[in-house]
Amino acid sequence: MNSSEVIAKIQKAIREEHLDGWLFCNFRHRDRLSDELLDRPPELTNSRFWFYAVPASGQPYGLVHAIEAGHLDGLPGAVQSYINREDLIRRLAPLRGKRWGVHVSENICAVSFMDAGTYAVLSKAGLVLVSAEALVQRVKGLLDEEGIASHERAAAGLYEIVAKVWDFAGASHGSGKTIYEGDLRQLMEDEFGRRGFVRDHSPLAAAGAHSSDPHYDFSGRGSALKEGDVIQLDLWAREKSPGAVYADISWAGFYGKPAAAAEEEKIFADLAESRESAIAFIETALAAGKPLTGAEVDAYTRSVLIDRGYGQALKHRTGHGIDTEVHGSGVNMDSVEFADPRFLLEGSCFSLEPGIYLSAYGFRTEVDCYISGGALRVSGPGAEKQGRQFKLLFC
């Protein structure tokens, strides 16, 4: 999109959130979100503050320091320069008394870039400041048809990769060949490369007690898989093309036979039921036209597991937004870490990944969902439930 199209999209979001405008600013490139949304190059010297106020309608208004007067070049609207603090405050006068979205948030730390000092200066200048968290979701965190198609292609690839990894693990178990966590991870990495996928971090392959660590990592080949180990896979990737959207799934299995895993099967069944309960909860709300927040989805999903006695085994939120970043700008299913008050909207894409983590092992089952045509869609190929894990897998 060119700059005029970007501003039009931003103004649409402002009107949808019933604000007067969105105020962008930056100093030393500390606010990567402002740079990204306004396409400010990272090599630009940014030793003084610039401000760019986009109103709900009409022309934007920019402020730059006199020694960095070209910082807003190429953007629509009038630009004025300032020299000192008094000059800056005076030139902020047209913004007084209006409600401006800015990059602060008590709930969504990933969009909270404005420092307390700048917030205080702007407030004293008479601006009414509110969080831009909902604006960010509308501009960055909602998928269009092209984004959904990209996401679905990535999801299809990830499910194919999981099948290959599990076939490999099963064949190794059947032959008695010793394999390592690193062998599983390398196979996933190789499949990413074969499909032209990119990712921001290596996927997770954890066995035994390591599966109780949601962010487990290792060097070399990691640990050997042993009879009776729980295996946890977590993989995420997207296509290389600009604007491609991530998919992110988790899969669990048992390195052994069902007769040895009665406890593990029961726990995993409870976990899968909590995931399906979350899906049904969202579907019911959408069908009734009831706005639903990410915090509400997380609280409901957690309640299902807490009622079954797993309260002490819950280590993280139920899910996160997904877009061109695996942890994207859209609504998170979170009521406990960074409680998300934002609503699930048309185009929202997010993971549902409840987890139960005990000392000996842990499970996480993750699917991706998005809202299209007012309905919830579970990402992945084929029929509605194809690709979703309902039972623990066995070698």
Image (tube, rainbow, N blue to C red):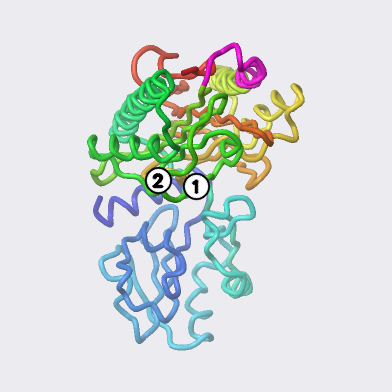
Residue at screen point 27% across, 71% down: 73
Q: Mark 1 or mark 2, which is nearer to you? A: 1
Q: Give amino acid for label 2.
A: Ser
Part of the protein shown in magenta: 256-270
Q: Identify which residue, 174 or 311, lies in the foreground.
A: 174
Secondary structure beneath dot 1 equals loop
Question: Which one is earlier in the sequence, the residue at label 1 or at label 2?
Answer: 2
Secondary structure, mark 2, is: loop
Q: Identify the disc placed on residue 202.
A: 2
Q: Nearer the viewer, residue 338 or 356?
A: 356
Q: Residue at x 32, y 35 (%)?
A: 147
Determine contact: label 1, label 2, CB under 8 Å. yes
Residue 237 is a magenta residue: no
* Type of the residue with mark 1: Asp
Which x, y percent locates residue 276? 57, 19
| Residue beneath disc 1 | 217
309 or 341: which is nearer to us?
Answer: 309
| Magenta span dominant secondary structure | helix
Q: Residues within 10 Å of mark 1 (few under 14, many from 20)?
A: some
